[in-house]
Image (cartoon, helix red, strand yellow):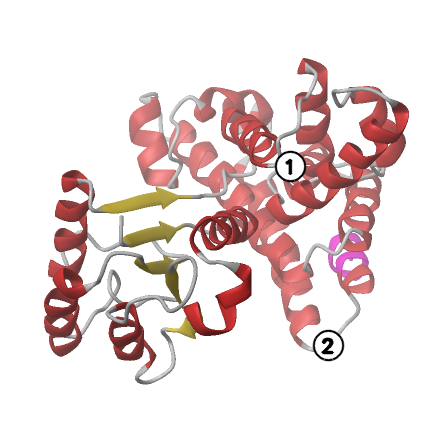
């Protein structure tokens, strides 16, 4: 298949898929000639990718043209779409065009429709790698299992839950920690990774922003700050933590307000709150029981103070302490 489309916000999984395809197609001895890495956000690079993909491979192996941030499935100009449609049938055997984009392809574009036809015809392939939401337990389980499978590692059943608890949906860190755990398992003479090994090798303080939000809702500010310290020490960007917490608390606020107005349909509540899985509403109702909407409003106000402090250059730990304890 000469054309490959990879998309999604799971950058670690995307990188693994890219490296796997390069290893399958390109002979390392000829990689300097047969492997091109281009950035579609730069002027002229998308057109260059089409031209290079039409060139047969030289020497051993095949040719692969990698176009990061490909514009062909998102905001593709008409002139570039014409060039794409003209170039695709001319890609020779042994040459591969790899299109990568973090955003979901826009199904309204003619280039996206053309690619979908090629996928159905078996002359193109499409894979997507999306990170699950921080509250999506089933999605996080799939992420852990998929990452372990990609790395050819075997996890014991309780190890999956331990990794979810320790790392959440941080795909890059999950991949890194699994590789360390694999080395530990190999040196210990075992063929699978256990929850015990995870407890020994991964910081027990690790948590995710969702747990921070739960602690804030409970009024346990000290616990929330302790978990925040763990996240910051693990390298989690402070503004990303703020964004996650803001989304979580805004969802609680919507649910609380709609419940106060007498709305009981979880589908209606989920749509208004921007929550993809209506079943999540049942959990949120239990969390909010006995708590007025003003509690969520107050928390959102404090997060605004934290965000403002971070953007003024405050240290993350200080910004969270001053904002949440103020």
Q: Nearer the viewer, mark 1 or mark 2?
A: 1
Seen at 31% across and 57% down, the residue is 94
Image coordinates of residue 239 in percent, x first then y, are 63, 61
Seen at 12% across and 78% down, the residue is 79
Q: Residue furthest top?
A: 157
Task: Please say whether residue 153 is visible from this viewpoint.
Answer: yes
Q: Quadrant of the C terminus?
A: bottom right
Q: Secondary structure at mark 2?
A: loop
Seen at 56% across and 36% down, the residue is 150
- The range drawn in magenta is 320-326
Dominant secondary structure of the residues highlighted in magenta in the image: helix
Image coordinates of residue 294 in percent, x first then y, are 56, 42
Please tell me which residue lies in front, 230 or 321.
230
Seen at 36% across and 43% down, the residue is 127
Q: Secondary structure at mark 1?
A: loop
Please tell me which residue lies in front, 226 or 196.
196
Pointer 1 or 2: first along the chain:
1
Please tell me which residue lies in front, 139 or 87.
87
Residue 264: quadrant of the picture = top left
Is 33 left or right of 223, judged from the image as shown? Answer: left
Image coordinates of residue 130 in percent, x first then y, are 44, 43
Label 1, label 2: how many angstroms apart (C-alpha)?
A: 27 Å
Task: Please say whether residue 263 is visible from this viewpoint.
Answer: no
Residue corresponding to mark 2: 313
Disc sitting over residue 168 in the figure: 1
Disc sitting over residue 317 in the figure: none
Residue 73: quadrant of the picture = bottom left
Is 241 left or right of 162, judged from the image as shown? Answer: left
Please tell me which residue lies in front, 96 or 101.
96
């Amino acid at each position: 298949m000469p054309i490959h489309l990879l998309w999604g916000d799971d950058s670690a999984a995307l990188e693994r898929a890219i490296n796997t395809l390069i290893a399958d197609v390109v002979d390392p001895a000829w990689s300097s000639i047969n492997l091109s890495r281009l950035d579609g956000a730069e002027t002229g690079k998308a057109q260059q990718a089409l031209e290079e993909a039409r060139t047969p491979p030289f020497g051993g192996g095949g040719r692969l043209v990698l176009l990061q941030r490909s514009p062909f499935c998102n905001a593709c100009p008409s002139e570039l779409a014409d060039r794409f449609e003209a170039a695709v049938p001319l890609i020779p055997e042994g040459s591969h065009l790899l299109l990568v984009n973090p955003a979901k392809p826009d199904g309204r574009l003619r280039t996206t429709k053309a690619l979908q036809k090629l996928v159905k015809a078996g002359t193109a392939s499409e894979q997507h790698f999306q990170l699950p939401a921080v509250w999506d337990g089933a999605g996080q389980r799939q992420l852990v299992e998929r990452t372990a499978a990609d790395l050819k590692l075997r996890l014991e059943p309780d190890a999956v839950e331990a990794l979810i608890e320790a790392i959440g949906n941080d795909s890059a860190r999950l991949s890194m920690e699994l590789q360390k755990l694999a080395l530990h398992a190999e040196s210990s003479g075992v063929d699978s990774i256990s929850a015990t090994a995870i407890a020994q090798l991964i910081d027990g303080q690790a948590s995710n922003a969702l747990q921070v939000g739960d602690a804030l809702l409970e009024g346990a500010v000290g616990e929330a700050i302790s978990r925040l310290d763990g996240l910051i020490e693990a390298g989690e960007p402070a503004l990303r933590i703020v964004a996650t917490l803001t989304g979580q608390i805004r969802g609680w606020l919507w649910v609380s307000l709609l419940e106060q107005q007498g709305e009981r349909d979880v589908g209606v509540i989920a749509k208004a709150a921007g929550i993809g899985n209506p079943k999540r509403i049942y959990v949120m109702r239990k969390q909010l029981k006995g708590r007025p909407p003003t509690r969520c409003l107050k928390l959102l106000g404090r997060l605004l103070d934290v965000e403002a402090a971070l953007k003024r250059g405050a240290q993350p730990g200080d910004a969270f302490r001053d904002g949440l304890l103020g």
